[in-house]
Image (cartoon, rainbow, N blue to C red):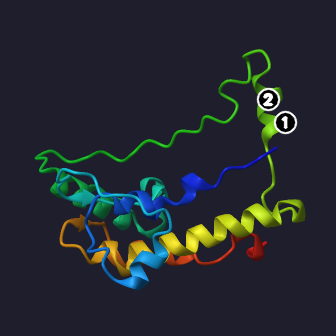
Amino acid sequence: QGVCAWRANFHDFLSRLGKTPMSSASEKQILQLGLDRVKSNVGPVFLYEVSQLSESDNDGGVRSTQFRTDLKRFLGLQEEIPPFPRVDTSGRFDFLPGVKHQINRNKIDICQPKHDIIRKVLMEKAKLASTWIREYFLESDEVFVSSRDHFELILESWMHDPCSLK
């Protein structure tokens, strides 16, 4: 079964927002798709990594609270944002005919040696995205993140193959 990794060029799609100069050779080398900027000003951007939505009380709830406070401030809200619910959809649609079978049939363990080639491609894209976001995108005055040091640590983790940690 063929796998398309094109959508993994996350940083290339972020570049369309026009928040970086995109003039240096080093930045252009990281941006491989050569996408054009959007024509209109998209305004400020609040960027988060999906794991930030589920951070919990492991650190006393400080990061989760800070994230919601930063998002509230960015959006200009007056009321507090409540904690994000944890949603687990695994098995939710198993009752539908054929769904569980199809899910299990399409499920892969990306760490198996037979997936080394696609994992290598995805890791290359993850490293490029991590580098571009940290070195270029976050330097814009119009890009906001919560807990920048922590956010950058999350992006730094994209530089390492999670399968090598197993």
Q: Amino acid at mark 1?
A: Arg
- Identify the secondary structure beneath mark 1: helix
Question: What residue sits right under mark 2 in the picture?
Answer: 102
Cβ atoms under marks 2 and 1 closer than 8 Å: yes
Question: What residue sits right under mark 1 in the picture?
Answer: 105
Q: Is residue 150 visible?
A: no
x 72%, y 16%: residue = 96
Instruction: Name the image quarter holding the C terminus.
Output: bottom right
Residue 155 vs residue 123: left or right?
left
Q: Quadrant of residue 5?
A: bottom right
Alpha carbon separation for disc pair 2 and 1: 5 Å
* Marker disc for residue 63: none
x 18%, y 56%: residue = 74
**Frontmost residue, 32 versus 79:** 32
Q: Amino acid at mark 2?
A: Gln
**Frontmost residue, 150 versus 20:** 20
Q: Position of residue 142 (x, y in %)?
A: 19, 66
x 65%, y 27%: residue = 92
Residue 9 vs residue 107: left or right?
left
x 26%, y 63%: residue = 18
Q: Relative to 70, say whether 30 is above or below.
A: below
Q: Position of residue 118 (x, y in %)?
A: 75, 61
> How many other residues sit within 10 Å of disc 1, few (<14), some (14-19) or many (≥20)?
few
Q: Position of residue 115 (x, y in %)?
A: 82, 60
Q: Is residue 135 visible?
A: yes
- Identify the secondary structure beneath mark 2: helix
Q: Relative to 160, say whether 32 is above or below.
A: above
**Frontmost residue, 114 versus 25:** 25
Q: Quadrant of residue 133?
A: bottom left
Residue 93 vs residue 41: left or right?
right
Q: Position of residue 27 (x, y in %)?
A: 40, 79
